Image (cartoon, grey):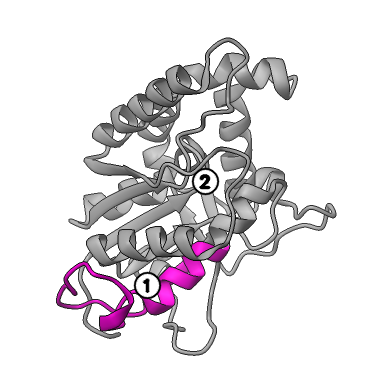
Amino acid sequence: MREMQQTALAFFAHPDDAEFVCAGTLIRLRELGWQIQIATATPGDCGTTVHDRWQISAIRTGEARSAGKLIDAEYHCLDEPDAMVVYDKPTIQKAVDLFRRVAPSLVFTHPAKDYMMDHEVVSLLARAASFVYGAPNVSAHPLKPGSGVPWLYYCDPPEGIDPLGNPIVPTTVVDISKQMEKKTATLACHASQREWLRAHHGMDEYVESMRRHSALRGSQNGVAAAEAFVQHRGHAYPREDLLAKLFPLKQ
């Protein structure tokens, strides 16, 4: 396995996305001494029925910082508009500059096909930035030692299904049974979203839906709770399964 800087970046569309789908794995990485960075493309400014976009942006980014502090992670926001994230030159540059500053060797993001377009566009941004951020001329930010094409993993979509209802078949599963209490605490930091999801999605089980899916992935793999991933193994990307090597699943 190649030498690397132990920096993991969880790059998602909205505050609370990382806590739903990969916080348990981030906690396990931090326990091994990795530096953890969490970033969102948007401040989640449409995730409310009661606040204006400025108020909810401040609330949600504050919640994201609080959640990050629980696992010793730094939070970043690209400040793109919620529900309108696009794959264009300015947004790609923002993503590349973020990756340049962080210099991740391991990246988590949304699956290429997901239930909402912000997620799919952020997945594209993560793929684009991960591939090119180590090129000297692509960003004005200094190139850090060890920069290069990182391991890239796509996280589970809600319910583990794609937009057509087809089940996702993971390449990698991480046991998070011992990390569930802290993962739950990070998600609970996003208190503003309980009311929003109840009003917009008809959900009044913000934390319980995460618990159920973690338990489902766990039951499929002989453990109490798990997070599932699909590894990006295209040309130039590492093909050995880093997560499986770090966290072998013991059944």
Q: Amino acid at mark 1?
A: Lys
Residue 123: x and y in percent read 56, 60
Q: Is residue 147 magenta?
A: yes
Residue 20: x and y in percent read 51, 39
Q: Is residue 94 above or below residue 204?
A: below
Residue nearer the viewer, 90 or 87: 90
Structural crowding at the residue carrying mark 1, measured as other residues with C-alpha within 10 Å and reported as few (<14), some (14–19) or many (≥20): few
1 or 2: mark nearer the eye: 2
Q: Is residue 213 magenta?
A: no
In the shown orientation, is residue 122 left or right of residue 245? right
What residue is shown with label 2? Answer: 13
Q: Quadrant of the N terminus?
A: bottom left
Residue nearer the viewer, 93 or 232: 93
What residue is shown with label 1? Answer: 245
Say what secondary structure mark 1 lies in. Answer: helix
Q: Is residue 197 above or below residue 3?
A: above
User: What stretch of residues is rendered in magenta?
Assistant: 124-153
